[in-house]
Each structure stands twice: as structure tokens, then as C-alpha cells.
Amino acid sequence: MPAESCHPLAHSRWGVALLASLAVFTPMAIDMYLPALPTIGRDLGTGDSQMQWTVSIFLLGSCVGMLAYGPISDSFGRRGVMLSGIAVFIAASLACAAAADAGTLIGLRFLQAAGGGGAAVMSRAIVRDIFPRAECARVLSLVALVTAITPMLAPLVGGQVLAAAGWRGIFLVLAAYGFVALALAWVRIPESHPAEHRAGLKLWAAVAVYAQLLRDRAAWGCVLCAGGTFAAMFAYIAGTPFVYIEHFGVSPQLYGVLFGLNIVSQMIGTYLNSRLLARHSLMTLSRWAAAVGLAGGTALLAAGLSGQGGLIAIVLPLLLVVGVSVLQASNMTARIIALYPDNAGAAAAALTSAMFGLGAVSSLGVSLLNDGTPLAMGLIIFLCCALAAAGLSPLFAGRGTGRA
């Protein structure tokens, strides 16, 4: 795509904010209804295991939807895919609000995730379409920051909606958000991937880029780095309720404050990344960030193994781990779509899908290994940070079949 874009969003004061609002469909729909899970289970007459399936099936639907939308948009354009995905999300959210049993809710959650995944992937692909390469990583950092903050704020919003309007009200709020996003996207986001840039690109060829990505060491490096860092953040989200509240006896109010500290650390990391990109390469900054994250993960594991240091020995390392999560996701997204400029949608979809997939695995690992101490969370986060650092090693430095 051209470096000097005439796309209106590239020069709009609110363009980045609008693209960020599309990127949050998936994390918002995952986390906003978490406080309501016990209530939903009682209301629908089912157990905790089936309620957990509504989370797992959503993550599966997100991965499937993201993988499908990428190559379709490379072949037929971003706008139609984006609007269709949001429409599916709205319809599924309304249907979830009316669900009468757990089985129906599980199926509808799959559709809701598949629809929301379209908006999430398209927001990143549109950034690649309309912004110059030098600015792409900075814009993606801002989009990723909003995406990372959402899982932390959404449960708080969901809890308030649950108290005021019940669990069905949460899905109505999600549908309302979808309506607003659809209206704004319809009016404000014209096609960013015009026909002349996709002329002759058949759908099967766009899908085939996934096979190309699997053979590309550089692409694997992007997946391991962004996915490992993202998975560490999901392990943090899954583990801290047990560690902070149950193990250390932290009050819900203080828990919210500690959560907020990590949001601040993400904002600092994103700001430094956007400023330093003007003087240092994307890969240099990512290697520095991986070292910071691995140091935090190592300290966290040491605290879990020794049982020494108390709460502060958990809080401080997490600031390092979570603080670099946003910039790694944005930098690796910028890298992979630069390697595949003609298949930016598919490349962004593959990376985003892998990030959510690894996030699901890490959160499940924390739940399965939880022994009431910080050890399980510390171990999983350390492994995720090590994976992220490995993705930036010389082994994954080659370009393989990708194109810069």
C-alpha cells in the first residue's frame, strides 16, 4: 500500500481511535461477562464446566474467524468483511441475551466470536493499508494498547451492568456497542484495499499464504514473540484473582488498584516504544523489551519457588512483564505485515489468531496447575516470556519465503 495514503482515516483526528474501537470486540466480549458466569450457570441450570465452555468456544471461534477473514479481505477488500463481521457480532449478541439453555449459549458464543474477529483483524489490516511503514508500528502500538487495556477494564464494566440489568443486559450492551461501531464504520471507513491492489488475487492464493507462513522462520519468530508475550498477559489475567485475593488476602478494591498499575506500565511501554522507533529499529526495541519481560518472568518464577518476598515480589515483576506486552504485539504485527504486504490481511489474521490461541493455552495452564500459591502463574509466565525471547533469536532471523 502507498506510503502517502489519501485515505481519510490517515488524516483524521479520530481515525486511530476508531480503528482501536474495532480491535476491542474480541477482548471485550471475552471479559465483560466473566463476573456473570456463576449467575448465568444458576439461571440456566447448569454447572461451572459448561459455563467454562462458553469461554473456550469463544476463543475457538475467534481463531477460526480471524483465519478466515484475513485472506477473504485480501481478495475482496476490507470494508465488506469488516461490516459483515460486525453485523454477525450484533445478531449473535442479541441472540445470546435471549438464550434459554447453556447449549444454545455455547453455540451462539462461537458465532459472536467469529463475527467480532472480523472487526479485530480488519482494524490491523487497515492500519497497514493506510499508514506508511515508518508510522505503522506506532499506530499499531496505540491500537494494541487499547486492546490490552480492555481485558482489564471489561470485567469491571460487566460487574456494574450485571448489578443493574442482569447477565442478559451484558449481551445487550455488547450488541449496542456493535451497533455504534457499525454505524461509525459505515460512515467513516471507506475501502482501504482498492481493487487495483488485489487485481488477480484469487481467494485460494490468499489462503495459500498460510502455508507460506508456516515455512517462514521470520513469521514464526513474530508468532512466538507476540504470542508468548500475549500469553504471559493472559496468564496474569487468569492467575492474579487466585494469587492476589485468595493467597495474599488482597481486598477487591486493592486488587483493582494493582490491576491499574499494570495499565500504567503498558502505557509507559507503549509511549517509549512510539518515541524510540524514530531512533532505533523495530527489532532492536523488541529485543530490549524481550529482555525486560524475561527478567520479570524470571523474578516471578523465583518468588513462586522460594515463597519469599510477599506480595511486592509478585507485583513488581508483573509490571515488567505486562508493561512490554503491548509494544511486542504491535511491533510484531508491523513486522509480519511488512513481510507480506500483498497479503496483509492474512498475515495479520494468522498472527492475531495465534496470539489468542496461545493466550487460551496459557490461561488454561494456570487454571490446571493452580495450587493456591503464585508458583503456577509464575511458571507459566516465565515459559511464555522465554518463548517470546526465543522468537527474536537468530534461529528466526531469516526471511524464509516472506517478502520484506
Image: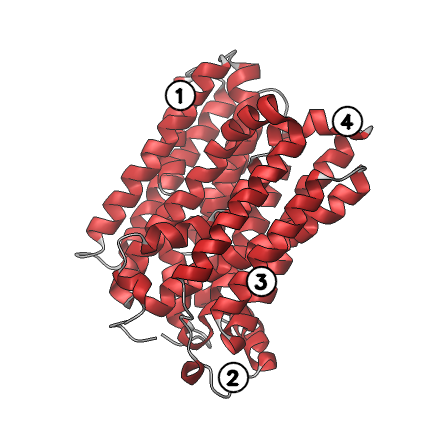
Residue flagged by tag 1: what amino acid is it? Val
Compared to residue 37, the image places residue 185 above or below, namely: below
Residue at x 36% of width, y 42% of height? 324
Which tag, 3 or 1, sits closer to the chain's start? 3
**Residue 347, x across and y down, in percent:** 48, 67
Q: Residue placed at 43% from the left, 64% from the top?
A: 125
- Residue under circle 1? 257
Residue 387 in sight here: no
Q: Name the residue under label 4.
A: 43
**Element class at badge 3:** helix
Please rate how many residues cluster around mark 2, counting C-alpha atoms within 10 Å: few if below 14, some from 14 to 19, many from 20: some
Report the Cα–Cα distance between label 2 and label 4: 49 Å
Report crowding for label 1: few under 14, some 14 to 19, many 20 or more residues within 10 A (C-alpha).
Answer: few
> Sequence-wise, which precedes: disc 3 or disc 2?
3
Label 2 residue SS = loop
- The quadrant where residue 323 appears: top left
Q: Which residue is drawn at 40% across and 37% down?
A: 321
Which label sits in the foreground, 2 or 4? 4
Give the x, y percent position of residue 102: 79, 38
Q: Residue furthest left?
A: 279
Circle nearer the viewer, 4 or 1: 4
Amino acid type, callout 2:
Leu
Residue tagged by mark 2? 201
Residue 76 vs residue 335, the one in the foreground:
76
Of residue 166 and residue 227, the one placed in the foreground of this image is: 166
Residue 188 at x, y = what percent? 39, 60
Residue 84 tag number: 3
Q: Which one is earlier in the sequence, the residue at label 2 or at label 1?
A: 2
Disc 2 to disc 1, how far (Cα)? 50 Å
Q: Do the residues labelled 4 and 1 touch (CB within 8 Å)?
A: no
